[in-house]
């Protein structure tokens, strides 16, 4: 694996910026579209660049192969459910808070991996990181100015959305021998197929009169944070490895808070900043413990 250069860090920052931009764009999309409709179109538009990449690289897409049930299950758990929960939650919660809540994903992954994987057990450093990170989440929920009885459930839905990402990641390990592009294209195809009839039946999107800014945000969500970001992630993983790419989680909540302030004028309080710092520090300890384990093997 090559030593990362300046350009590699620029790519990593671009990836974090694209993923962070999803939150305020989801907020804008909710001005006109319902959560299930947002989930469907995000998956649909995200599938397009990944499918074209598979065609260009002559990678077979196995969405309807003998492993179709795995792809369909991951599509539901890793795409449809979290995309819906996040879109539903962001209706009543600031996008910058959603970015911080979603940054708890690596912390949730640490707990779940301890019980459901063989080689990612907890140690003292990981426990410290998880405790610090979740202290930040608790601090965020104690911010009565921004999270109260009216939107508490919505904030919890965003947090649950991050947990489904982790569960989907665990299921993906079952088909880890397949090419990333094939897996991503296959789960996006199934995610679109599953979410389409549900959105039609539940929300009847043909009755909407969407605003232009909401429609632009919806298209952006699919093409960039869902499709292009995955392709960029593949490039970074291939060149610099998983540990380097995982550092993107440090940057996403930071960019999320900044973008929410710039584009939506969202309120930033001391508790929001403290929660942000705690989550980033917690994730640092978790990543540091993984590096220690790798060196000791």
Image (cartoon, rainbow, N blue to C red):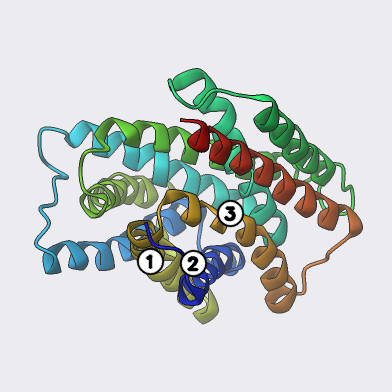
Residue 232, numbered label: 1
The residue depicted at 43 percent of the width and 64 percent of the height is 207
Indicate which disc, 2 or 3, sits on the residue closer to the N terminus.
Answer: 2
Crowding around mark 2 (Cα neighbors within 10 Å: few <14, some 14 to 19, many 20+) is: many
Q: Work out whether residue 90 can be spotted.
A: yes
Crowding around mark 1 (Cα neighbors within 10 Å: few <14, some 14 to 19, many 20+) is: some
The residues tagged by marks 1 and 3 sit, at their Cα atoms, a distance apart of: 15 Å
Residue 249, numbered label: 3
Indicate which disc, 2 or 1, sits on the residue closer to the N terminus.
Answer: 2
Position of residue 57 in the picture relative to residue 289 (left or right): left
Q: Position of residue 131 (x, y in %)?
A: 75, 32
Q: Secondary structure at mark 3?
A: helix
Quadrant of the image occupied by residue 130: top right
Q: Secondary structure at mark 1?
A: helix
Q: Position of residue 147 (x, y in %)?
A: 81, 48
As drawn, 167 above or below 221: above
Q: Work out whether residue 91 can be spotted.
A: no
Q: Position of residue 143 (x, y in %)?
A: 87, 48
Position of residue 68 in the picture relative to residue 81 (left or right): left
Indicate which disc, 1 or 3, sits on the residue closer to the N terminus.
Answer: 1
**Near-viewer residue (23 or 29):** 23
Pointers 2 and 1 in contact (C-beta within 8 Å): yes
Residue underneath mark 2: 15
Quadrant of the image occupied by residue 198: top left
The residues tagged by marks 2 and 3 sit, at their Cα atoms, a distance apart of: 10 Å
Q: In the current view of this chain or complex, which residue is farthest to the bottom?
A: 212
Crowding around mark 3 (Cα neighbors within 10 Å: few <14, some 14 to 19, many 20+) is: many
The residue depicted at 55 percent of the width and 41 percent of the height is 291
The residue depicted at 51 percent of the width and 51 percent of the height is 246
């Amino acid at each position: 694996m090559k030593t990362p250069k300046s350009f590699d860090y620029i790519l990593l920052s671009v990836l974090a910026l694209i993923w962070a931009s999803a939150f305020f764009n989801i907020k804008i999309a909710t001005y006109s579209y319902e959560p299930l409709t947002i989930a469907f179109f995000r998956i649909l538009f995200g599938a397009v660049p990944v499918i074209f990449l598979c065609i260009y690289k002559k990678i077979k897409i196995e969405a309807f192969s003998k492993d179709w049930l795995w792809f369909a299950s991951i599509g539901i758990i890793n795409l449809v459910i979290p995309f819906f929960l996040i879109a539903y939650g962001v209706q009543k919660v600031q996008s910058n808070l959603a970015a911080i809540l979603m940054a708890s994903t690596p912390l949730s992954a640490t707990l779940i991996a301890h019980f459901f994987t063989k080689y990612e057990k907890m140690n003292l450093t990981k426990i410290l990181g998880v405790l610090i990170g979740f202290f930040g989440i608790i601090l965020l929920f104690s911010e009565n100015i921004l999270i109260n009885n009216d939107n508490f459930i919505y904030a919890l839905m965003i947090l649950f959305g991050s947990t489904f990402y982790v569960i989907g990641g665990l299921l993906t390990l079952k088909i880890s021998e397949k090419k990333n592009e094939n897996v991503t294209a296959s789960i996006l195809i199934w995610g679109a197929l599953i979410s389409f009839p549900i959105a039609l039946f539940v929300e009847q999107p043909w009755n909407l009169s969407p605003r232009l800014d909401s429609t632009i945000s919806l298209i952006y969500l699919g093409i960039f944070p869902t499709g292009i970001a995955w392709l960029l992630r593949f490039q970074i993983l291939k060149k610099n490895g998983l540990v380097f790419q995982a550092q993107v989680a440090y940057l996403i909540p930071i960019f999320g808070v900044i973008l929410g302030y710039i584009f939506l004028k969202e309120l930033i309080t001391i508790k929001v900043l403290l929660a942000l710092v705690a989550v980033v520090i917690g994730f640092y300890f978790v990543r540091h413990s993984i590096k220690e384990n790798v060196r000791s093997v």
